Amino acid sequence: MAVVKTVADRKDNLDKILVKGGNPLVGKVTVSGAKNAVLPIIAASILAGSPVQIDDVPNLTDVDTICQVIASLGVAVARDGNTVKVDPAGLDTFEAPHELVSKMRASVVVMGALLARMGKARISHPGGCAIGSRPINWHLKGLEALGAQIRINHGYLEATAASLKGARIYLDFPSVGATENIMMAASMAKGTTIIENSAQEPEIVDLANFINEMGGKVRGAGTNVIRIEGVSHLNGAVHSIIPDRIEAGSYLVAAALTGGDVTVENVIIDHLKPVLAKLRESGVEVIEADTSLRVIRRSELKGIDFKTQVHPGFPTDLQAPMMALTTMARGTSIITETVFENRFMHVEELKRMGANIRIEGRTAIVDGVARLTGAQVKATDLRAGAALLAAALSAEGVTEIENTYHIDRGYENIVEKLQGLGAQISRA
């Protein structure tokens, strides 16, 4: 098996998106598998002693990167549409290449899986979006508690453990990545591990379900205490990735901002409760069905206040798109970012389109304007790119968005999906 060409290869490296705004989005759009679930699950596949099949995998550059990371470790990886097959039998090295890890911060989650399988792991400090400090000391603290010895040497993290042993671990902050890394390492440690103040995101639950499908014993995922009983061996499994709640929320916001009528299909509604509450507060009608959400905007938007929090609070990944919504809402909106300290980089780009926003520390004050106008803007990170797309779809005139490789890290076929909703959008 071999890793297929990357998304960038297939798109001939086009890195601009042109949007002619002013058309309400109308129709149906289907949400892809969750980026933030599939990346750790692909990393965890190297824990298995036999082949793994992962379905509903989104076609994203970040997925390409994690597949390349585990392939560089000797693991066989094949992609066929939205299915990834992994055969970890050839795993023969414990070092993930710098040039791959530096592309994407989520690569750090191979550390726990490598420790469990190889007793060693060596990775460079991870890269990713520059949205603020995301220290990995919580990862290292947890792995050390399981018996790993950690060294930081010339920009590399080196971990070794002759034998991992279960432990009680309290996370100072409910870090998603740290929770995932510890879960993977603990899944094959001797004894029982208890993670207190663990992350509760739906993607944590999906990873736990995958480990359990391989024969692991993880309980409590989705709460702030996770209990893992280590097993000596994990088997192959077939697993389907949960829908992407952030992608779903991004389409809901774009539909509302353009004054549209859109049904977003393949959603788990419970994953979006804080977002739906704020959309309704802004004056948008939201109709819930079993696995779909319909958003209709019949009147002007109203200003809202919200604060990002760890799950089950309002997700930081939807702060930027929701800010785009408030730029054209009547009155003043107050948005407080508590998770990442540098996640307002999209503000200057939205201001280029006519938005009225001022920043005071970790708070953005948005005074709604009557209209946005097209401009040349740059996506500064993944979710900032989604915010600029939503704004461009509602703006008068043409918007040119640069650095769209950020967007392709997290949104599968976004141009084609928006075209299906009537948007005048193309790559350039």
Image (spheres, rainbow, N blue to C red):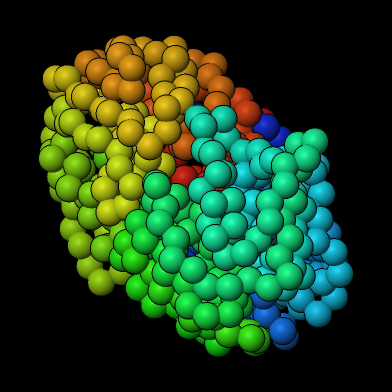
Query: Residue 295: percent from the left, percent from the top?
Result: 24, 50
Residue 252, above or below 46: above
Image coordinates of residue 65 in percent, x first then y, are 71, 52
For the point 21% across and 24% down, the residue is 334
Q: State which quarter of the image contains the N terminus.
A: bottom right
At x 60%, y 68%, the residue is 185
The residue at the point 36 percent across, 12 percent down is: 354
Above or below, 209 against 283 in this view is below
Q: Quadrant of residue 227?
A: bottom left
Q: Looking at the picture, tell me which residue is in the foreground, 350 or 167.
A: 167
Image quadrant in which you'd find residue 289: bottom left
The one of 293 and 67 positioned closer to us in this rendering: 67
Q: Which of the image's four quarters has the C terminus?
A: top right
Residue 9 coordinates in the image, percent (x, y): 78, 47
In this picture, is 2 found above or below 414? below
Apparent side of residue 314 relative to residue 192 in the rendered image (left or right) = left
Between 109 and 35, the one nearer to me in the picture = 109
